[in-house]
Amino acid sequence: MSEPEATARDYKDTVFLPKTAFPMKAGLPQKEPGILARWQEIGLYQKLREERAGREKFILHDGPPYANGDMHIGHALNRILKDMVVRSQTLLGKDAPFVPGWDCHGLPIEWKVEEQYRKKKRDKKEVPAKEFRAECRAYAQGWVDTQREQLKRLGLMADFDNPYLTMQFESEATIVAELMKFVESGNLYRGSKPVMWSPVEETALAEAEVEYEDITSTQIDVAFEIVESPIPELVGAHAVIWTTTPWTIPVNQALAYGPDIDYRLLDITYDAGAPDGQSPQAGTVATVEAAEAAGLPADATRILIAYDLVGQFKARLNAALSKLNIEGAVEPTVNVFDALGVKNSRYKGSELAGTVARHPMHHLGGFYAKPRPFLPGDFVTTDSGTGLVHMSPDHGEDDFDLCKANGLDPVFAVMDNGVYRDDWAWLGADDLDNEGKPRRRSVINKPFNAPDGPICSDLRAAGALLSASEDYAHSYPHSWRSKAKVIYRCTPQWFVPMDKPLDTGDFDVGVPEGFGAAVALFTSKDHSTLREIAMREIDRVQFYPPKGKRRLGSMVEGRPDWVLSRQRAWGVPITLFVRPDGSYLQDSSVNARVVAAVREQGVDAWDESRKAEFLGEAHNSDEFEMVTDILDVWFDSGCTHAFTLEGDRWPDQRWPADLYLEGSDQHRGWFQSSLLESSATRGRAPYDAVLTHGFTMDSKGKKMSKSLGNTIDPRKVMEQTGADIIRLWALSVDFTEDHRIGDEILKGVGDQYRKLRNTFRYMLGALDGYVGDMSDATEIPELEVYVLSLLAELDAKMRKAAEEYDFNTYTRLLVDFCNEDLSAFFFDIRKDRLYCDGAEDPARNAYRAVLDILFHALVRYAAPVLVFTAEEVWQTRYPEDGEQDGSVHLLDWPSIPPVGAPDARWAQLRTLREQVMEAIEPLRRDKTIRSGLEADVTVPAAAVPEGFTDDRLAELFITASVTRSNSDAVTVTRTTDHKCGRCWRLLPEVEEDGALCDRCDKVVSEMDAAA
RNA sequence: GGGCCGGUAGCUCAGUUGGUUAGAGCGCACCCCUGAUAAGGGUGAGGUCGGAGGUUCAAAUCCUCCUCGGCCCA
């Protein structure tokens, strides 16, 4: 023991404090772009490909975002998750090349380009299709470039120099080739379905191109005479239907009832008001005359109607009646009574099955003479109308579906311009123009539908019009652009059948290169339907989270046939040659020529001018028409697997993908289109697993929207706090469900980030100058062994989390370990040893050896999450690696020394440690002691695990001393020892405060001697 | 309106087949340290598990209804 020096020496210089250039403050917004630039410079993505060549592959196939608009939080989340998958799989040792993609065709881009035309006062119809498409292409390319730069900023490991675009010629050619597989196997048919149609623009409209406006329409009640029924008393009565589109009556084909609705058979009397003040009796001659005088159908007075709607119906009749000035009538009214002479006049809808009516114009014969059956419709309600709905499969979705199910097909009587075709038998023969010539007016023409228009007039003449008034106010769809009314109209469309047995053995021609192994999966004996194959695949595919399986399954199970066609310009053409009867050419050599032409020239290749060239000598081009429809963009995206994973454009890709990862909305979208496309062409899904994420809400759990002003812009977050913060956020929340983002949440994420950063900073400082390894340590203290076992345990959990894409657990494990096991436990206990033991003391070296192992493990764990910070950490420790174009992102998963599970004694020890801390607290409160180092602690002997000496306990508890007793309480007193001037521990050998303890005396002497 | 999914401390998340007083980290409050210092350590306060019924000896967990929110449809 040395003598105390005359003046207290400041031993600070002799203490080995952590030393590092790694700043506590991150300054990520400034730092990240530089790191990004360096990765770009050293070609990190390519470098990683070279280093991983030959390893087991992991293919995450990118679902293409639409090339329109800036990056938003949803993109950011999606890309970060994908990047985490790619990087964690890479870290796990695999080769995970990632090709980003963009969806480039489609309506929203067409709109934008059209909008530009409108600004320039150009009519789209005058622009040649080629030119229009070129502008769409340029527009899409512009956004691809913009989004690519925005996404890169997130620090993504992806082949951004060589992305896939659905509009690249090779992609377009493959899409056509894929379509031709459907063609050649006959898995395509021409059908029809009602779409929103604008008669003014003569084009189909998407739902989003339609806006609703309040208008007033004609409403009419029409009587359909019942001619057949299992209920005898119905025969001869009239079913009443109500509609606001009189123009659809000419193509009526059926009546729909609600199976659960109550109907009544009723008699109407038209009471013209008794001139002599007497009330006329129902059914009397006087009322019939009054009705006839009013132009109302006196012979259609027994009606069938939903009981709940009688009141509304009566009101309409009265309104119509009051508008007719009947001579001599005072207050014309309509009365409704239970049908006379009918015992039970109430019927449940389901009893109406088998009932048949006839069209009011049945006398015209032909189409109109056919029976109009009563069909059950779930969509029939008693909200309005009469509870009986007139069905025209040409002009309504419900109508179409119900009629189709009952063998009634649309008749296509209304042409593109909204006018009935000339040969249609009836639509008001007296419709004459000003010069008295017959004319055909558009069905959206108001006078055409008016109560005195041609339709109503003829119905009235036929005695079928019970009421007609132009006073029904409702909202009705209009075209966005022309503001004109739109209609539902059946148009021919191309469909993929879901339930037709597939002949999957016939793919010998027209199959593009790279089809490869997939074709072998087929057995031509498999005649499953597309739906069956898809369902089988859904069953096989792994879903994360598992509920996705059910969601996709229920959608595929119930979906209708796939409509592939769109009446649009910007997209991949449906390259079909059609005969007048709707059948199409199935000639693989023709198809091969078309595919080759598209590869050469893109979608513009599908041009009338090349018709003969494509058809070749084997076919007479006069017999065929070229289809001008384009493909649904979902078909494009359903083919991304074909042109990205197969073929040689990206040789390091592989079909099928291990994983598809998108938002849960893609159960209806990309997951499904890819599944259907691939199931039909390859007999299996293009993926083995599907991972879905939820949507990002604001801090209150509400959906983000620009109008609410509650959006969070990921680019702003990156500008203000850095990409690593937003990455850590995305990987901390439960992304499998909807989750939130907001200032408070980001602040919390920032706190977590700082904890991780400081953990690294401490390790870097503590490891300053350390070049040894575990083999230098002659003996390893048990605490170090324990920490290594904790690390091994952590490692197993982290690996499992990474393998299961459980990133929230992954980051939480990492943060908790840094907080609890390292910062508050291991580092705190070993601070004394690091600072004050001799520089080369074996025990100190053992600690640093473990720190080194921890460092190498943690920097790797952190790398996929904090991509920038991990690199900064790595380059700080190994600047020479930086000079050699190295990167933390080239490393493999850490190898942890093979230590067993943590010794159970240590769990016991840590419980005791907590009790000691708790016991010290009161003395701190009353200022008896300030730090734990001033405490003499007595612990119950029974609570101490086997094999720990008192001195070691004091070391682990960071107290002056520990003794044990037979009591079962932990007791604490202030120590009487003095404080060592160097290590600040209070020890018995220190004679007075400021003197040195034995250990420090030795260390300082050696240092002084060496100096 | 329909289908599916979700609601556990201020925040982010755990809660296995229903089984002691519902856990963790962060944040917060208070305290210590001032040799990891815009850092580090300690203690503590926070929850009628969205609400109401029901099943059970026992419910955050199972059932029903309601409510709020989300996705996809209509």
Image (cartoon, helix red, strand yellow):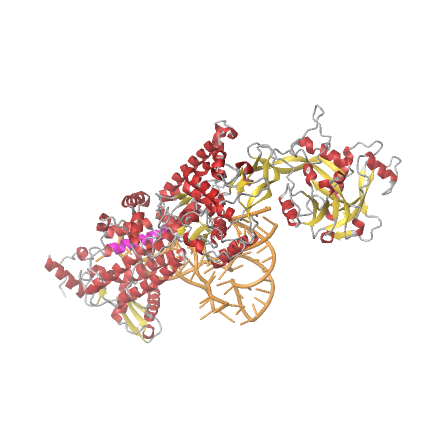
Choose top left, top right, bottom left or bottom right for residue A789: bottom left
Tell whether A125 sits left or right of A286.
left
Name, please, the residue furthest toward the bottom: A966
Q: Quadrant of the C terminus of chain A?
A: bottom left
Q: Nearer the viewer, residue A234 or A466?
A: A234
Tell whether A194 sits left or right of A587.
right
Q: Which residues are magenta?
A: A747-764
As drawn, A649 above or below A610: below
Choose top left, top right, bottom left or bottom right for residue A958: bottom left
As drawn, A179 above or below A851: above
Res A974 seen here: no
Q: Nearer the viewer, residue A371 or A1000?
A: A371
Q: Nearer the viewer, residue A513 or A966?
A: A513
Q: Quadrant of the N terminus of chain A?
A: bottom left
Q: Is residue A750 magenta?
A: yes
Name, please, the residue furthest toward the front: A617
How many discs mark residues in the rendered view?
0
Q: Residue A3 at what x, y percent from top left? A: 13, 63
Tell whether A1001 sits left or right of A731.
left
Q: Residue A513 at what x, y percent from top left? A: 41, 48
Res A134 seen here: yes
Q: Residue B2 at what x, y percent from top left? A: 60, 52
Q: Nearer the viewer, residue A455 or A338?
A: A455
As drawn, A433 above or below A992: above
Q: Residue A805 at what x, y percent from top left? A: 40, 56
Q: Which is the main secondary structure of the residues drawn in magenta?
A: helix
